[in-house]
């Protein structure tokens, strides 16, 4: 498919109060148009020499056959312009059964990078991608050697839950990849369970009944032992892999309304962000003070669909919603007074389905709306 490019004037960024510490020199917005509705998306944690970005996006098509595209960027000179324009193009397509509920690239492995244990040792130097849907799948992506910036892909593993007695497969709603031990992935399912996988051996390390109803999302804290989950029973639950006999409920919605998504602040792991189904607000929790939110972020006129903490700052967070807005908030003073207004607002051209903040290049946020992926410099 030919790459599609939007000029930096597509969409609108408005500064509502003060900006973050390093305001951008110029507003940059780049758009890729897919042949289907874009739902799942993820930034690669590797930085390529010949491509400023590498991302994966997943289709949302209400049928069995779906697609994952690996996107890269290149600069091309334009007529009547001294500056080359960055173009986003599809470097690889992967056929995927059903829509991906989530996509993640393999983290670099902070423990391994610092000389500790862990790591996906059987993967060599390939860039690994994981997806969830009906099952957990692992894919490797590598240069195809044609010198055209295109990629090859290979399915490395199909990890099936250890319930061999049933033909029924409980769909996986989400997963998280441990940054400190990349051999470990935890998945959540509508069957109320969370499953911890060792992707080196491709076997289940342990499985817990996490909630009373469907589990919708989960996230690791900083480190290798603690993760949290949210679900249809309206609770946020904390688990420690060293002691899985019990979990800790740190928050419940007032009328047990379902909680849809969960994001852990990796710069300050005392804080979590979550939101209810069909809610216009984002809930910020402090695990040291359970049961009561430390603040609630409003600002949206539509249902919140995604939230992402800044990977380089402990006090900035981005939310996105059906009102076609992505809002960045400064939470520095949230323990002293309510956070009423975002510091930055971006108006997209449609309801924002998903949002990711790049950990390897933290000046950039990506959003998905309709059939478009947009990359924004913040």
Image (tube, helix red, strand yellow):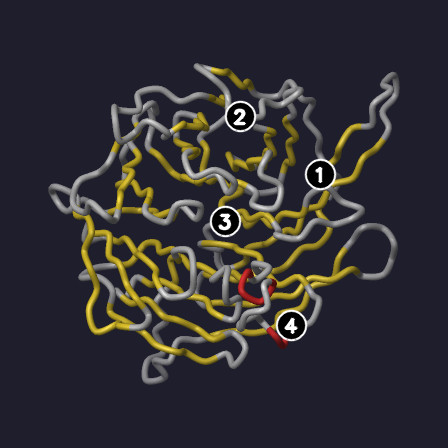
Query: Which labelled disc corresponds to residue 88?
Result: 1
Q: Nearer the viewer, mark 3 or mark 1?
A: 1
Could you tell me which quadrant the C terminus lies in?
top right
- Residue to which mark 3 is pinned: 61
Q: Residue at the far front: name it.
A: 115
Rendered image quadrant of residue 361 = top right
Against 363, is 269 above or below? Answer: below
- Circle 2 — which element? loop
Q: Residue at the far left: name it.
A: 255
- Residue to which mark 2 is pinned: 21
Against 270, is 214 above or below? Answer: below
Task: Please rate how many residues cluster around mark 2, counting C-alpha atoms within 10 Å: few if below 14, some from 14 to 19, many from 20.
Answer: few
Task: Pinpoint residue 121: horizontal percent, then vertical percent.
Answer: 61, 75
Q: CA distance from mark 2 to mark 1?
A: 28 Å
- Circle 3 — which element? loop
Q: Nearer the viewer, mark 2 or mark 3?
A: 2
Horizontally, residue 362 falls left or right of residue 315, namely: right
Q: Residue at x 19, y 69 (%)?
A: 246
Query: Which labelled disc corresponds to residue 194?
Result: none
Horizontally, residue 248 falls left or right of residue 329, namely: left
Could you tell me which quadrant the N terminus lies in?
top right
Q: Residue at x 61, y 29 (%)?
A: 377
Q: CA distance from mark 3 to mark 4?
A: 31 Å
Task: Pinpoint residue 376: horizontal percent, then vertical percent.
Answer: 59, 30
Against 365, is 112 above or below? Answer: below
- Circle 4 — which element? helix
Task: Please rate how many residues cluster around mark 1, counting C-alpha atoms within 10 Å: few if below 14, some from 14 to 19, many from 20.
Answer: many
Q: Nearer the viewer, mark 3 or mark 4?
A: 4
């Amino acid at each position: 498919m030919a790459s599609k490019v939007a000029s930096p004037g597509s969409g609108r960024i408005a500064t509502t109060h003060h900006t973050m510490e390093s305001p951008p020199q110029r507003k940059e917005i780049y758009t890729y148009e897919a042949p289907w509705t874009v739902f799942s998306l993820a930034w690669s944690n590797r930085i390529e020499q010949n491509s400023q970005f590498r991302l994966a996006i997943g289709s949302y098509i209400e049928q069995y056959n779906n697609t994952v595209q690996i996107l890269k960027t290149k600069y091309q000179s334009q007529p009547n312009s001294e500056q080359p324009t960055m173009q986003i193009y599809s470097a690889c397509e992967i056929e995927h059964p059903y829509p991906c509920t989530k996509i993640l690239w393999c983290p670099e492995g902070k423990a391994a990078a610092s000389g500790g244990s862990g790591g996906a040792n059987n993967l060599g130097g390939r860039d690994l991608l994981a997806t969830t849907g009906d099952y957990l799948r692992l894919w490797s992506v590598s240069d195809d050697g044609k010198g055209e910036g295109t990629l090859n892909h290979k399915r490395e593993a199909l990890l099936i839950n250890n319930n061999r007695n049933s033909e029924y497969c409980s769909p996986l709603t989400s997963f998280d990849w441990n940054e400190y031990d990349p051999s470990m992935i935890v998945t959540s399912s509508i069957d109320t369970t969370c499953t911890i996988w060792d992707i080196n051996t491709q076997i289940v390390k342990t499985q817990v009944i996490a909630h009373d109803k469907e589990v919708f999302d989960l996230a690791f804290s900083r480190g290798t032992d603690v993760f949290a989950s949210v679900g249809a029973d309206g609770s946020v639950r904390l688990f420690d892999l060293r002691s899985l006999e019990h979990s800790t409920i740190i928050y419940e919605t007032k009328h047990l309304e379902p909680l849809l998504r969960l994001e852990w602040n990796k710069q300050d792991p005392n804080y979590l962000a979550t939101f209810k189904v069909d809610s216009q607000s984002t809930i910020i929790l402090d695990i040291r003070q359970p049961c009561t939110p430390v603040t609630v972020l409003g600002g949206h006129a539509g249902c919140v669909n995604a939230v992402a903490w800044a990977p380089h700052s402990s006090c900035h967070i981005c939310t996105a919603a059906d009102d076609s807005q992505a809002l960045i908030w400064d939470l520095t003073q949230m323990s002293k007074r309510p956070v009423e207004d975002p510091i930055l607002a971006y108006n997209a051209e449609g309801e924002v389905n998903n949002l990711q903040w790049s950990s390897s290049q933290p000046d950039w946020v990506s959003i998905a709306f309709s059939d478009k992926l947009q990359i924004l410099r913040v």
